[in-house]
Amino acid sequence: MAWCRCSLTKRKSSIQQDHGTSLAFRSKWKQTTIGSNVIIGVLDTGIWPESDSFNDKGFGPPPSKWKGTCKGLTNFTCNNKIIGARYYRSDGEYEKADIKSPRDSDGHGTHVSSTAAGNIVSMASVQGLGLGTARGGFPSARIAVYKVCWLFGYLATLSNFAPWYLSVAASTIDRKFFTEVQLGLCSDYTLDPNLVKGKIVLCDGENDGVGQLLAGAVGTVMQGRRPNSGVFAFPLPASYLSLEDGNNIYSYINSTRSPTATILKSNERRDKFAPNIATFSSRGPNPTSHNILKPDLAAPGVDILAAWSPISPISEISDVELDKRALSYNIISGTSMSCPHVSGAAAYIKSLHPTWSPAAIRSALMTTAVPMSAEKNPGAEFAYGAGNLNPLNASNPGLIYDIDPLDYIKYLCGQGLSTKLLQAITGDKSRCPKGSDGAVFDLNYPSFALSTPPLDSISHVFNRTVTNVGLPTCTYKAIVTTPPGLSIKVNPSVLSFTSLGQKLSFSVTIEGTLEKQIVSASLIWDDGTFQVRSPIVVYGAF
């Protein structure tokens, strides 16, 4: 089973179209028995089961291996697409507004589920915006939903930097959504209705628009104080401007005694600079294991169109009386949107290679990712990892870097964990193997990261093992891109395989001096058919 997990941060603003995410996935999908045996588990705010994205047409009964349940629920019915549904609240204390069932009243979980495994739905849009075909990463997969995130509670920061996690950055898609303003600090109850009623209000800073709405404004323009990677929904006509554009409007207002403005209908245009990493997407380096590169890769997470709960407001307000718009699909942004793209791709790979381990699947996703530009993305690999997701290539990667669960135990032991903490993580009675140094550099990861004091002389060796999953007989040659100041050597530089499943080992030696805070390199194993790419990052210790 593949898993999506909810994030406590979200941005209601997204869009995925049949042409919008720039992923190399099949545009036409044929339901297969193998695919329908794959189940994606979603831990989030629940799901809206009546959505067209979760129609079970073409699905047979759940696979015999399924042991989950969907019984005893009020006003909630599963089908052959949604085959499991449960809800949990750790403290057992429910708020009055909570729906005591897996039904989603927030929209986030529905959006995530349909992004990962939603059916193909034509003519999907947000009131005409982003009109196109909505489809999940793996429409053939089934869904088991677990409602664990609720409308109320404490916000917290979630960090996924352990080496057994697949950490995903959020990238942009090939189009932007915008609302133009044509020129011809707004908190609730702070505006004078006598001055605001019937007018378009210019506000300094980002807000949800409720204050302007309550005061009787017919529209609002907000001057942002930070970069914005996605679109936002507001309860009244609105436009969110950059600091520079906002200053231009201030200048216009001060230039005339009777300033006027018109907020035009939201529209879309192609983004020729995509994909880039969103400003809200967390950057590395890894705060605990400095020599494990995080994030692992990137996937579309900005302006993603997916299914929505019709009882949830589409704007960033909780009062449905202020925003009564009911939508079946919504546009939102966040790493919560990029994660299910990868979950769908992982499920797709699992359907083709059912015996592959999670580490093998991660390797396939990372080594086939599309390289991204360090010049366009501050932080380089610390922003996008191995690159942008490429699901079709990941289904047939040529070579994989696999990791045995025992290797993770050795890694933890090398971090100095006590037996008690080790067993708390593994969930069993694991103990550190004798003679295990748990060297993080030798964890068979599909990327290479080296933290070093600035200006120090560098001399380090990584050891790796790859498994042949491509052609039975093949020879791979190492191609290394090396930045100035460093020498990177691979030994051996040629790997010759004579059978599928054969494993061969090699080492990567990095020597030299770090001339910048971060330098990027790469290793590609190339046999003429497959190109298996791993990023190499050397950076100054913080």
Image: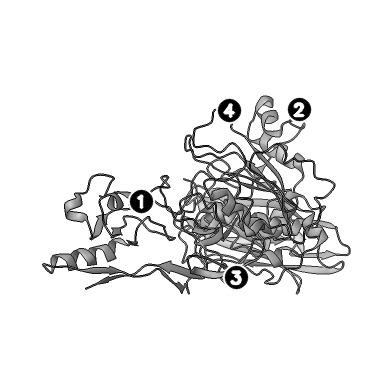
Residue under pointer 3? 18
Q: Is residue 307 left or right of residue 140?
A: left
Neighbours of disc 4 within 10 Å: few (<14), some (14-19), many (20+) = few
Residue under pointer 1? 208
Distance from label 3 to label 4 (Cα)? 41 Å
Distance from label 3 to label 1 (Cα)? 30 Å
Earlier sequence position, callout 3 versus callout 4: 3
Asked whether 406 or 106 is in front, the reply is 106
Distance from label 2 to label 1 (Cα)? 50 Å
Query: Hey, which quadrant is residue 226 in on the image?
Result: bottom left
Residue 496 percent across, percent down from the top left: 83, 65
Q: Amino acid at mark 1?
A: Asp
Q: Amino acid at mark 4?
A: Gly
Q: Amino acid at mark 2?
A: Lys
Q: Given contact means CB atoms under 8 Å apart, are the residues at marks 4 and 2 in contact?
A: no
Residue 84 percent across, percent down from the top left: 71, 44
Residue under pointer 2? 429
Q: Amino acid at mark 3?
A: Asp
Residue occupying the point 72% across, 37% down: 409
For label 3, the SS is: loop
Distance from label 4 to label 2 (Cα)? 30 Å
Question: Quick check: can you spot residue 451?
Answer: yes
Residue occupying the point 73% across, 39% down: 71
Q: Given contact means CB atoms under 8 Å apart, are the residues at marks 2 and 1 in contact?
A: no
